[in-house]
Image (cartoon, helix red, strand yellow):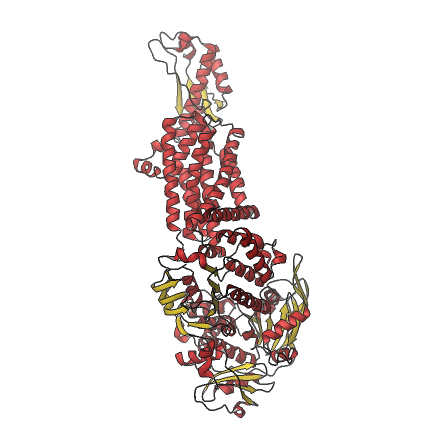
């Protein structure tokens, strides 16, 4: 069958603050009907730009976009009625109710009479929004908002459905439901509807019939996932690991010849080897039994990326601090925070010993950020106690803050200042003076490989370097505790690994790390996790143990996401 | 129902629901006009009340006492009866009085025998502020006239062989500046609220990301813009009606022209103002910048160049030319005519045409910049 849409050498340049940004570089691809085409890549890869072109919202700098055979530069109006588009940001009216939003889109698409009611009711049923038709969109949870957005985009029986990262920030259960809804609607459309699903979650790529893998505006691959992974068959291994020293094992494994990637997954280590490399010698890094595992999409992505740009050398290790004294560095007891009659944080307790990487895992709106803000001393708890580095947050928040480093999810340094000026500013803000300040900045530049970019403006840096700069700024005053807010969501897998390798070194040197994330891949890097849902801690354990809790015959090898869904489901 | 009407109806219903749920639009439409009308209407008066005047009267006869009483009775004057010319001069120099009225010893004598020698009084005015100076002289003359009218016969009033200038103040016989200013404030109010209403709504859609889904939906730009214009037009007209009613009831300004014409002219100006706001917010895509631009582009021209406060005819030629491109100018002229004079077609028709052109141009410009792209 002919394709629904086609891109011919699509190039898109944007004028940036420091010159032209090449968002898309000569992309040629086809979108087939009746299947889901994944547009996969890290943040900044060009996914949104590509979808906006398919929706006719941008004019190409070069090249051509055709949808249903219409050139979108000239005849977009002919294609609009058959396109359903769900932008990345919630594109519906928050001050309108669920029913009113649907009704608006029904009017815009000219739905009338019985068809209108039938279609609306069916979508409300499918999305589970039927009981909430009168609720304002602003009062919906993240997952429900996405379902409403999906329902509106599906209302007019589109022939091309464009979904821009619908599953970001959504709880895992809702994420699975989104997939189910789309697959059911595709079955109903009987091959008449093609779906383009943009995502930075690499595990979602495997569910697509075909994947356009984007990286820095380039198309790395445009084949079905199976074809993409074919070259990796027999190159991915799993090695069992002792409970201790997992991070050292990773570092050791990476030095072996032919190892492209080493990643801890619970109590095992996943290794991707170069083509033709011999099976890994587990004794060299303290591993146990070695077995083959089927490759995942991420393995393939790393394989492609490593061939594109050779890995950077591992950064020098930090001096290791005196052994851990076993006393908790962060101690949270029965923490409560109310906003009016809404309980954002409901009796949360956990304690974190020195040198541990501890994760708060939960979807947007679960209460992670509120807990985080209380621990940073930015928000007063309504009840309970919290001690950070020995200081009581209720009485000595300022003392506690001096011992904290904080790295926000969004890049929160000054984009118009250079790297050096940013570091200098944060050093002064933390009270470092004279020689101590210069020494701290020099060390940060050295340790985080910022020397070459020290006079570039921060806004012009690539995502991965920006992240190193943020981390360097957070660590200038040598804090005992490091808070990270979704540090690597949307970052490509190579940069994510490099980032977590640094965090691992910090933890080994005695820095206590607290991470919040809704992102299962990030959770794997934590020593222990607290799963948070609707303000409450559902479970606290190591990633391996959390998975073990839900292991069954039906689910012999559960993922952390499986564990999350089952544990949250059981607690509800 | 055609699909186009269905889309328009859906979009209009959405706008109305948003207005009802978000009070900021209602505040702009109904509270802002009241505040502006009251603050400017009551605060800004071009009448000078209780101007201080020193009077030096060297004569002490019956007619002079009458004049003194008339001066005292004037609501615009506050008279200081100076003991001597020197004392009056000192008071003038010290800024305590605005002018000196002097009547010599022979004033009364001459008054009785005007055929031989007309009676003379001297008024010296501090003209550093020419406007107040002129007002003062007018008020003193007024006091004299009322005294003359009360006590003298016609033949005395008219000097032999001379010409008597008899002044009549038409359209605003009480010379109340508020009658002249308040219609001007309506212009200010309508251009600010009209522009602000739409300047905020489109940029809000850009900020909240809803514009992106609207652009990808099968509604044309004309429909998107039209639905917004339509709904906010109704809101703006309601706001205008309220302002007009306040003008007549609270400020006591007469409405001598027809209400229908008032509605028509206001409608044309409102379309211009709404389209201007849409234009701004389409370009800015940011509520803060939009609000700034809306204030700057409406407040300044409406205050300075519309003829609301400053007479356009007395501006330099090049500035007069600029005012031709400011629609508020035509609205001010039309409103002042409608309120104070009536249906004067020779004045209203050119203004009406100019406003119609402005409304069409602004709408066309808005449609031209709202293309269906994100770039």
The residue depicted at 61 percent of the width and 85 percent of the height is A243
Q: Position of residue A387 (x, y in %)?
A: 65, 70
Q: Residue furthest left?
A: B317
Quarter of image, res A391: bottom right
Left of A106 or right of it: where is A415?
A: left
The residue depicted at 48 percent of the width and 34 percent of the height is B44
Q: Quadrant of the N terminus of chain A?
A: bottom left
Left of A38 or right of it: where is A60?
A: left
Look at the image and tell me whether residue B240 can be seen: yes
Closer to us: A57 or B104: A57
The residue depicted at 46 percent of the width and 80 percent of the height is A229
Number of numbered discs: 0
Q: Position of residue A569 (x, y in %)?
A: 65, 70
Q: Is B78 located above or below residue A315 in the figure?
A: above
Q: Position of residue A404 (x, y in %)?
A: 57, 71
Closer to us: A481 or A535: A535
Q: Is A496 located above or below residue B57 in the figure?
A: below
Q: Position of residue B186 (x, y in %)?
A: 47, 35
Left of B323 or right of it: where is B153?
A: right
Look at the image and tell me whether residue B61 can be seen: no
């Amino acid at each position: 069958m002919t394709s629904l849409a086609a891109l011919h050498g699509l190039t898109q340049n944007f004028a940036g603050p420091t010159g032209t940004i090449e968002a898309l570089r000569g992309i040629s691809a086809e979108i087939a009907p009746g299947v889901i085409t994944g547009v996969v890549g890290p943040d900044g890869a060009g996914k949104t730009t590509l979808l906006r072109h398919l929706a006719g919202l941008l004019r190409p700098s070069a090249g051509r976009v055709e949808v249903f055979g219409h050139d979108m530069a000239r005849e977009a109006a002919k294609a609009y009625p058959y396109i359903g588009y769900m932008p990345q940001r919630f594109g519906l009216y928050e001050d309108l109710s669920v029913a009113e939003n649907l009704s608006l889109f029904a009017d815009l698409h000219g739905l009338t009479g019985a068809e209108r009611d039938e279609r609306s009711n069916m979508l409300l049923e499918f999305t589970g929004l039927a009981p909430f038709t009168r609720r304002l969109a602003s009062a919906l949870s993240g997952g429900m908002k996405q379902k409403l957005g999906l329902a509106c985009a599906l209302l007019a029986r589109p022939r091309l459905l464009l979904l821009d990262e619908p599953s970001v920030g959504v709880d895992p259960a809702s994420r699975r439901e989104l997939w189910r809804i789309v697959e059911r609607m595709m079955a109903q459309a009987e091959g008449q509807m093609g779906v383009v699903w943009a995502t930075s979650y690499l595990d979602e790529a495997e569910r697509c019939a075909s994947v356009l893998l984007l990286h820095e505006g380039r198309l790395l691959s445009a084949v079905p996932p199976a074809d993409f992974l074919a070259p990796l068959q027999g190159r991915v291994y799993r090695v069992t690991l002792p409970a201790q020293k997992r991070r050292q094992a990773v570092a050791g494994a990476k030095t072996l010849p032919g190892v492209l990637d080493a990643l801890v997954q619970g109590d095992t280590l996943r290794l991707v080897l170069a083509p033709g490399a011999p099976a890994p010698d587990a004794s060299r890094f303290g591993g146990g039994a070695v077995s083959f595992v089927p490759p995942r999409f991420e393995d393939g992505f790393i394989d492609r990326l490593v061939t594109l740009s050779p890995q950077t050398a591992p950064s020098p290790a930090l001096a290791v601090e005196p052994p851990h004294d076993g006393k908790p560095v962060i101690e949270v007891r029965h923490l409560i925070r109310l906003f009016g009659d809404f309980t954002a944080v409901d009796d949360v307790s956990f304690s974190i010993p020195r040198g541990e990487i501890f994760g708060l895992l939960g979807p947007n709106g679960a209460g992670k950020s509120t807990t985080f803000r209380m621990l940073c001393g930015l928000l007063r708890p309504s009840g309970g106690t919290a001690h950070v580095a020995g200081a009581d947050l209720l009485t000595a928040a300022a003392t506690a803050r001096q011992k904290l480093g904080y790295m926000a999810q969004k890049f929160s340094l000054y984009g118009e200042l250079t790297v050096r000026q940013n570091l200098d500013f944060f050093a002064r803000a933390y009270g470092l003076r004279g020689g101590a300040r210069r020494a701290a900045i020099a060390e940060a530049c050295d340790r985080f490989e910022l020397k070459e970019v020290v006079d570039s403006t921060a806004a012009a840096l690539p995502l991965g370097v920006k992240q190193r700069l943020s981390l360097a700024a957070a660590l200038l005053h040598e804090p005992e505790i490091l808070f990270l807010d979704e540090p690597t969501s949307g970052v490509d897998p190579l940069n994510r690994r490099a980032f977590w390798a640094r965090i691992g070194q910090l933890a080994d040197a005695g820095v206590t790390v607290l991470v919040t994330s809704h992102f299962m891949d990030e959770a794997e890097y934590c020593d222990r996790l607290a799963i948070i849902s609707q303000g409450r801690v559902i479970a606290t354990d190591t990633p391996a143990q959390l998975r073990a809790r839900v292991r069954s015959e039906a689910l012999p090898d559960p993922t952390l996401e499986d564990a999350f869904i089952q544990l949250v489901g059981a607690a509800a | 129902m055609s699909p186009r009407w269905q889309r328009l109806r859906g979009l209009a219903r959405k706008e109305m629901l948003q207005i009802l749920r978000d009070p900021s639009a209602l505040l702009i439409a109904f509270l802002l006009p009241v505040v502006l009308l009251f603050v400017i209407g009551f605060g800004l008066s071009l009448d000078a009340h209780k101007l201080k005047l020193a009077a030096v009267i060297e004569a002490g006869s019956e007619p002079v006492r009458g004049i003194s009483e008339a001066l005292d009775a004037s609501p615009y004057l506050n008279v200081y009866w100076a003991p001597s010319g020197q004392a009056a001069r000192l008071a003038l120099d010290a800024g305590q009085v605005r002018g000196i009225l002097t009547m010599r010893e022979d004033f009364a004598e001459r008054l009785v025998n005007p055929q031989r020698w007309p009676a003379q009084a001297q008024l010296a005015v501090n003209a550093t502020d020419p406007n107040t100076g002129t007002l003062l002289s007018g008020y003193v003359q007024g006091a004299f006239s009322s005294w003359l009218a009360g006590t003298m016969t016609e033949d005395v009033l008219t000097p032999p062989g001379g010409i008597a200038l008899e002044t009549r103040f038409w359209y605003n016989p009480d010379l109340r500046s508020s009658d002249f200013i308040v219609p001007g404030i309506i212009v200010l109010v309508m251009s600010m609220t009209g522009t602000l209403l739409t300047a905020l709504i489109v940029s809000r859609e850009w900020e909240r990301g809803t514009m992106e889904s609207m652009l990808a939906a099968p509604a044309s730009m004309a429909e998107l813009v039209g639905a917004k214009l339509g709904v906010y037009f109704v809101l703006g007209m309601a706001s205008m009606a309220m302002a007009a009613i306040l003008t007549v009831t609270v400020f006591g300004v007469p409405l001598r022209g027809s209400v229908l014409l008032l509605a028509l002219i206001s409608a044309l100006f409102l379309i211009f103002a709404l389209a201007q706001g849409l234009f701004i917010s389409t370009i800015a895509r940011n509520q803060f910048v939009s609000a700034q631009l809306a204030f700057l582009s409406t407040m300044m021209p409406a205050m300075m160049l519309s003829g609301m406060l400053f007479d356009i005819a007395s501006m330099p030629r090049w500035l007069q030319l600029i005012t031709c491109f400011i629609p508020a100018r035509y609205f001010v002229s039309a409103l002042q005519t409608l309120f104070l004079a009536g249906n004067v077609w020779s004045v209203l028709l050119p203004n009406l045409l100019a406003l119609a052109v402005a409304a069409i141009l602004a709408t066309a410009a808005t449609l031209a910049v709202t293309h269906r792209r994100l770039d």
